[in-house]
Amino acid sequence: MTTRHEDGQIRVEKRGNLLLMGIDRPEKRNGFTPKMFAELARAYRQLEQSQDLF
């Protein structure tokens, strides 16, 4: 079982050439927190810097 952070989280999963990003904060209808914005920025940076991801 995965423990969820109280401020929500962005889940990132690499599947082959795809980088999947998911919002995980259903109790607040997936409302964003500063922590989640930072995680999303890191995920997009990873996507941008990788030649093999779409």
Image: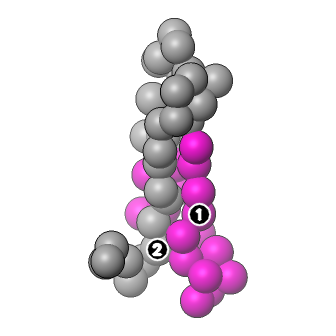
* 37 or 1, nearer to the observer: 1
Q: The C terminus appears in which quarter of the rendering?
A: top right
Segment colored magenta? 20-40
- State the residue position of label 1: 23
Quarter of image, res 17:
top right
Above or below 22: residue 14: above
- At numbered mark 1, what does the secondary structure look like: helix, strand or loop? strand
- State the residue position of label 2: 8
Q: Is residue 46 magenta?
A: no
Q: Residue at (57%, 48%) from the top-left corner?
A: 21
* 39 or 19, nearer to the observer: 19
At label 1, which amino acid type do we have? Answer: Ile
In the image: residue 5, left or right of residue 33: left
- Is disc 1 surrounded by few (<14), some (14 to 19) or many (20+) residues within 10 Å? some
Q: Residue furthest bottom?
A: 27
Q: Is residue 25 magenta?
A: yes
Residue 33 placement (x, y as % from top left): 51, 70
At label 2, which amino acid type do we have? Answer: Gly
